[in-house]
Image: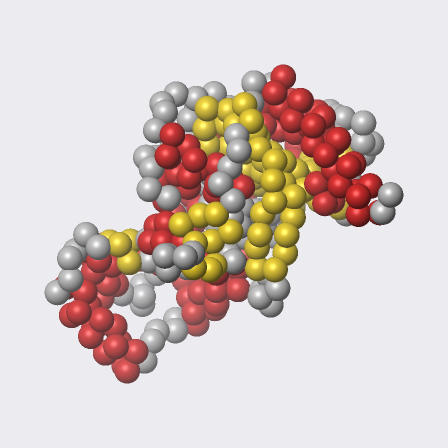
C-alpha cells in the first residue's frame, strides 16, 4: 500500500474517532457546501474574504469560490436553514485558500461550532476539542480576547473616525501598523487625494444610498466622510495613544498572571475600558477550569489576523505544531447576510495532527 493511501486511511480513521467525540458532546454532523457564492463574500465583506479565496465562474458565468474556511461555510448554512435556537454543528472536509504569494493551499479541517448560545460557549468548545488531545502530553494553549483590544482602542483619546478605522483594520496587521505610523506622525493625505475623495462623494450621493459597497451602505460611507472633514487631529494625544496600543500588544504572560497585568496596565494609563471586568472574569474562569491541566499563555497579538474573531480566540499546540484553532465570531453571520448571532467554534488541522 502506498504512503498516500496509508495517510488517507489514517486520516479517515482519526476523523471518525473525532466526530464520535463531537457527537457525544451533542454536535450534529453537517455536510457543508464546497462552493460559496463569491458575491456573498464581496458584497457583505468587501475584498477581505475574497482575496484569499480561489474564485472561478460556473457554466452560467456566475462567479463562485471554493470555501476558504469551513467556519464561513457553517455560518452560511446556518443562515440558509433559517432555524431558531441553539445549533451545535460538527463538520469534516477540505478548505482551499490562497497564500500571500497566490499559491493554493489545501488543508483538511474537522471542527465543531455552537451558534446562538448565551451560556459560555468557550467552555464547551475548549473542553470538547481538548478531549481529542487528552493523550498528548504537555499540550499548550495560546489565548486572547479580541473584544478587550477593541474596547481598549475605543477608550483612547482619539477622534471617533480614527477609533473606527483602527478597529475595522486591526486584522490587517501591515495596514494597521501603517495607520499607527500615520497617527504618530500626524500624517494626512495631500490636497490631490482629498479632491479625489470629494469627487467620489459627489458620485456616491447620486447613487441609491442603501446600495452595499465593500460591506457598507453608500449612506454610511458618506456619513463617515463628512464626520472625517469635521474632525480635527491637532488636539488629541495621538502619540500617547499609539504608545498605549503598542505597549498593550506586547503583553504576553501566563494566563493567571495576565489578569493582574491587564488591570495594572489600565490603571497606569488611566483607561476606562468598556467591559474590562467582563473580559477579566472570562479569562479568570478559563484559567480556573483549564489552567491546572494545561500551560495557557495570554498573548495580546494572537488571533488578530483572523478577521471575524470578536472575543476569545485560542490555539492548541504540541511543541511548535499548531493542532487546532478557534474563537468567538459574533458578527460573522450578520456580515454574511443573517441576523446578529453569537457563535463560537474551533477546527482541528488534520494535516498537522496526523
Q: Is residue 141 left or right of residue 9?
A: left
Q: Is residue 232 left or right of residue 19?
A: left
> In which quadrant of the rendered view does residue 254 lie?
top right
Q: Is residue 292 left or right of residue 151?
A: right
- Residue 262 position within the rendered picture, expressed as x and y whole percent measured from the top left: 56, 40
- Residue 313 position within the rendered picture, expressed as x and y whole percent measured from the top left: 56, 39
Q: Tell me what residue is drawn at x 46 percent, y 60 percent.
A: 56
Image quarter hosting the N terminus? top right
Toward the front, the furthest residue is: 59
Pick the front one: 77 or 99: 77
Can see residue 345? yes
Image quarter hosting the C terminus? top right
Against 98, residue 322 (above or below) is: above
Q: Tell me what residue is drawn at x 78 percent, y 36 percent.
A: 10
> In which quadrant of the rendered view does residue 332 lie?
top left
Q: Tell me what residue is drawn at x 54 percent, y 37 percent.
A: 327
Toward the right, the furthest residue is: 1
- Residue 324 position within the rendered picture, expressed as x and y whole percent measured from the top left: 66, 39
Against 197, residue 336 (above or below) is: above
Pick the front one: 289 or 314: 314
Can see residue 295? no
Q: Is residue 53 left or right of residue 208?
A: right
Colouring chosen for the image of the structure: secondary structure
- Residue 145 position within the rendered picture, expressed as x and y whole percent measured from the top left: 53, 39
Toward the left, the furthest residue is: 206
Amino acid at each position: 500500500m502506498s504512503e498516500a493511501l496509508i495517510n488517507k486511511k489514517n486520516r479517515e480513521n482519526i476523523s471518525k474517532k473525532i466526530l464520535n467525540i463531537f457527537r457525544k458532546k451533542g454536535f450534529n454532523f453537517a455536510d457543508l457546501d464546497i462552493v460559496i457564492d463569491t458575491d456573498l463574500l464581496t458584497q457583505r465583506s468587501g475584498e477581505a474574504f475574497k482575496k484569499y479565496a480561489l474564485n472561478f465562474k460556473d457554466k452560467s458565468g456566475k462567479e463562485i469560490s471554493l470555501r476558504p474556511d469551513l467556519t464561513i461555510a457553517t455560518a452560511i448554512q446556518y443562515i440558509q436553514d433559517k432555524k431558531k435556537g441553539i445549533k451545535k454543528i460538527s463538520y469534516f472536509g477540505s478548505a482551499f485558500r490562497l497564500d500571500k504569494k497566490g499559491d493554493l493551499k489545501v488543508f483538511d479541517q474537522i471542527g465543531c461550532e455552537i451558534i446562538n448560545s448565551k451560556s459560555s460557549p468557550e467552555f464547551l468548545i475548549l473542553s470538547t476539542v481538548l478531549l481529542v488531545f487528552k493523550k498528548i502530553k504537555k499540550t499548550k494553549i495560546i489565548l486572547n480576547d479580541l473584544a478587550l483590544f477593541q474596547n481598549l482602542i475605543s477608550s483612547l483619546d482619539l477622534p471617533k473616525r480614527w477609533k473606527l478605522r483602527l478597529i475595522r483594520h486591526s486584522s490587517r496587521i501591515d495596514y494597521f501598523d501603517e495607520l499607527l505610523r500615520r497617527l504618530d506622525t500626524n500624517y494626512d493625505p495631500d490636497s490631490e487625494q482629498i479632491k479625489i475623495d470629494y469627487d467620489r462623494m459627489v458620485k456616491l450621493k447620486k447613487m441609491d444610498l442603501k446600495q452595499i459597497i465593500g460591506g457598507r451602505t453608500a449612506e454610511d460611507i458618506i456619513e463617515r466622510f463628512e464626520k472625517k472633514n469635521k474632525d480635527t487631529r491637532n488636539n488629541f494625544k495621538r502619540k500617547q495613544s499609539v504608545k498605549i496600543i503598542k505597549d498593550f500588544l506586547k503583553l504576553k504572560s501566563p494566563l493567571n498572571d495576565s489578569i493582574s497585568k491587564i488591570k495594572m496596565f489600565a490603571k497606569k494609563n488611566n483607561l476606562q475600558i468598556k467591559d474590562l471586568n467582563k473580559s477579566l472574569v472570562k479569562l479568570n474562569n478559563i484559567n480556573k477550569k483549564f489552567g491546572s491541566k494545561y500551560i495557557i499563555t495570554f498573548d495580546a497579538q494572537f488571533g488578530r489576523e483572523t478577521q471575524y474573531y470578536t472575543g476569545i480566540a485560542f490555539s492548541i499546540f504540541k511543541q511548535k505544531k499548531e493542532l487546532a484553532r478557534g474563537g468567538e465570531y459574533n458578527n460573522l453571520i450578520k456580515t454574511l447576510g443573517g441576523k446578529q448571532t453569537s457563535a463560537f467554534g474551533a477546527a482541528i488541522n488534520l494535516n498537522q495532527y496526523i
